[in-house]
Amino acid sequence: MRQLGTLDSAFINLEHANTPQHIGGFGIYDPSTAPGGSVRFKDVIENYQSRLQKMPIFSTRLVEVPFGVDKPYWVVDENFDVEFHLRHIALPKPGDWRQLCILIARLHARPLDMKRPLWECYIIEGLDQIEGLPKGAFAVYTKMHHAMVDGSGSESFMAALHDLEPNPKKRSKEVVVADADKPLLAKPPGSLKMLRKATFNNLKSIYTLPAGTLKTTASMAKTLFSMATKKLPAAPGATPKTRFNRPVGPHRVFEACLFELADFKNISKTTETTINDVAVCVVAGAIRKYLELHDELPEETLACMMPMDVSARGNSKENNQIGATVCLIHTDIESHLERLYAINNSTREAKQFVDTPLAEMARIPGILNPWLAKPIAHLYADRQLTQRMPMGSCGAITNVKGPRMPLYSAGAKLVNYYCAGLLTPGTGMFQAVFSMNENITISVLADRDIMPDPEVYKQCMEESLAELKAEAAALKKPATVTALRQPPSVKKSSPASTATKPKRAAKPKKQPGPQENS
């Protein structure tokens, strides 16, 4: 019997109409590499069918325990139809980038049908007016519930759906509905069977919960003691709230930038920081510019939540192998280089909390049974209780490592890929960094009321990288690097900074058809 783990259950319990708990992304494909120079929708369906046979989780659905007295189960969907999950659509003419972003935002805002396998996939044609794309290019957008997969798992999912060559050998069509490590039920368990198992699990928890609570309390005490004795850095304190901490509604916006990975590598090498630090610095600079443009930049630094891979702990019962930590992004520092070194220090400090209870706070909604956890989660969201919290992150930033070799799907070459995360109550922005081959993409998903002008935010990101590149190019080593790495007597600026504000982008005209953002 395949039952959800604690963290997987947490994402189910947190599901809300305004904050659906799925993640996703879309890739851009060049069909010229396919046999015959084109790809048919039928080819894509056959490709997915053959691949999904090797990934039984994608043909399973969720079964809730009666009365919500235990964690739900995964069972094979006896009515599974891959064509229900694969949809073929097209942008109306002219088919430009803005229209694609609006369509992705609309698709990503829609909750999944919780009675079916928790994923959907859309093949999107009509991208002919997007600059820089090959002729006839199409996009494939996929979304999956976070209970099924995390960032690392989505990388495996991408690998499973692609080939290393455009015309590989034919695969076997033998259906595989289970695997040895994680067996799945071919039929839903009966209510009485689930209730018996729930009774056993709840009785078991009576004995294990005190020991687990004691262990967690001891671990937390050890963490606090380490912080008091400075063996661990102090955790970030209260940070200012901004527009990104407003209540999250049901509508989304999406935007993304495509950069050359070489620029990030050069800055990283010159400044002796990491590529991740450079990406976070670009994001922090964009947030600073955007808030400054709206006259809302706080004098104090903001913080972001950063997911972390904890798969090294070896909890194979969970689909999700992630933790999270809060990291200061130093939006109070005007100089891009000084901000970069401050972020380098903050990210190194944040990583020291990976093995502490502070990195596992996301598991809490999954510890309680659904009958209690779901009403609490809905009360928290519906009553907008995040507004009463003393602090809050201005969003989330995740870094997903992509493939380092060309990938093909149904013969079409994957050109670029853009990630889309999820929002939580009181945190209205999620940014994802994805590197693949010689490119790096930074995507932003936000609440539409919180960020009504995503094209302006994109401009802020582009300017942030350009200015960071210019400062790094003028950097004289090693004396300047040594000086900047000293405990910051950094030069901070106020919201009244004289920095040049980005120009507002022209408001896009209202477009007819399915891409209209209503």
Image: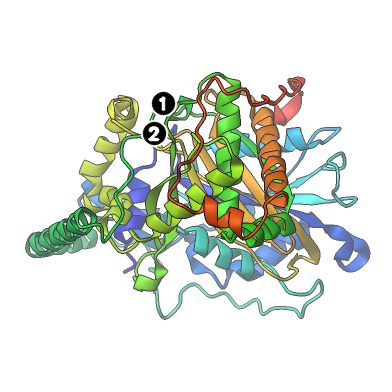
User: Which amino acid type corresponds to the residue marked 2 in the rendered image?
Assistant: Pro
Asked if disc 2 and disc 1 are in contact, CB closer than 8 Å, the reply is yes
* As drawn, 291 above or below 109: above
Quarter placement of the C terminus: top right
Q: Residue at x 63, y 59 (%)?
A: 268
Q: Which mark is residue 101?
A: none
Q: Earlier in the sequence, mark 2 or mark 1?
A: 1
Crowding near the residue tagged with mark 1, few <14, some 14–19, many ≥20 C-alpha atoms within 10 Å: many
Spatial CA span between label 2 and label 1: 6 Å
Quarter placement of the N terminus: bottom left
User: Which amino acid type corresponds to the residue marked 1 in the rendered image?
Assistant: Pro
Q: Position of residue 73 (x, y in %)?
A: 34, 59
**Residue in the foreground of this view, choosing between 354 and 34:** 354
- Residue 388 visible, this orientation: yes
**Residue in the foreground of this view, choosing between 285 and 208:** 285
* As drawn, 138 above or below 262: above
Q: Residue at x 44, y 29 (%)?
A: 248
Q: Which mark is residue 425?
A: 2
Judged from the image, the secondary structure of the residue bearing numbered disc 1 is loop
- Count of numbered tags: 2
**Residue in the foreground of this view, choosing between 260 and 177:** 260
Judged from the image, the secondary structure of the residue bearing numbered disc 2 is loop
Q: Position of residue 286 (x, y in %)?
A: 60, 36
Say left or right for 190 vs 76.
left
| Residue hosting label 1 | 247
Crowding near the residue tagged with mark 2, few <14, some 14–19, many ≥20 C-alpha atoms within 10 Å: many
* As drawn, 425 above or below 223: above
